[in-house]
Image (cartoon, rainbow, N blue to C red):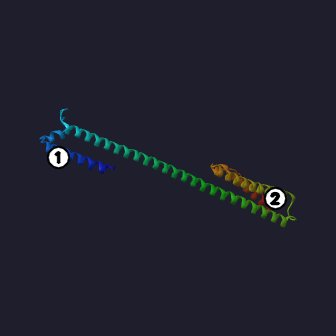
Amino acid sequence: MNLGGLIKAFDTVMALRDVARRMKGDPAPAAAESGLMQSPGGGIGSQVEARLTNVVMAALKEAFDRDHARLELERAQLDEQRRRAEEAMRQELRRQATDRELARLRLIAGTALIAWIASVSVFVARTAAMPVYARGIMAAGWLLLLAALAMAFTAQSRAGEEIAGGGDARAAARPGTTAVWLLTAGLALAAASLIF
C-alpha cells in the first residue's frame, strides 16, 4: 500500500465520521477536530472513531517504516555499487601500471639483446685490429649487457607473478631499474672498447 492510498483512506474515514456525526445530530464536530477530548462514555460512534483512527495511524506508521526500510536497502545497494566501482577502478589502474612496466622491461630486454648482438658483430669485424685491453673491455661490456637482459627477464616474470597474486607489479619490477643501469654501463663499455 503506498502513501497516497493511505491518505485517501484516511480522508474517506474522516468523511464517514463526519457523516455519522451529522446523522447522529452531534452539533460540535469542530470541537472534536480541534483536539478536545470527549468523555469516555461517548458512545459507539466515538469508539469506532478511535479504533479507525488507531488503524489509520498504524497503517501510516507501517507505511513509513516500510519506506524507511526500502530507503535503507537502496542506500546499502548504492554503497555496495560504489565500492565495487572503486575496486574495479583500482584494478584497472593497477593493470595499466603493470602493462606500462612490462612494456618498459621488454624494451630494456630488446635493447640489451640488440646491443649485445651489435657489439659481437663489431668485435668479429674488428678482432684483428683491437688490442687485448680493448677486447677485455668489450667482454666486460658483453657481461653487463647479458646481465641487463637477464635482469629484465627476471623482472618481467616477477611482475607476472605479482599480477597473478593480486599485488603491485611495480614493486616486483624494481630489478628493472638495475637492468637500466646495467644496460647503460654495458653500452658505455662496448663504445669505450671501440675508441681504443
Q: Residue 126 placed where, x, y %?
A: 84, 66
Q: Distance between the residues labelled 1 and 2?
A: 112 Å
Most foreground residue, 162 or 50: 50
From this view, report whether residue 115 is shown above or below residue 61: below
Amino acid type at image mark 2: Met
Q: Position of residue 7 (x, y in %)?
A: 27, 48
Residue at left offset 59%, top offset 53%: 94
Q: Is mark 1 on a helix, strand or loop?
A: helix
Sort mark 2 into few (<14), some (14-19) or many (20+) by Cα contacts within 10 Å.
many
Question: Measuring 87% from the left and 58% from the top, which residue is drawn there?
Answer: 132
For mark 1, does the 10 Å Cα neighbourhood hold few (<14), some (14 to 19), or many (20 or more) residues?
few
What residue does disc 2 label?
Answer: 138
Circle 1 is placed at which residue position? 19
Whether residue 73 sits left or right of residue 189 in the image: it is: left
Disc on the earlier residue, 1 or 2: 1
Q: Which residue is drawn at 20% across and 38% down?
A: 44
- Residues 14 and 30: in front is 14
Asked whether, in this view, residue 171 is left or right of residue 74, the answer is right
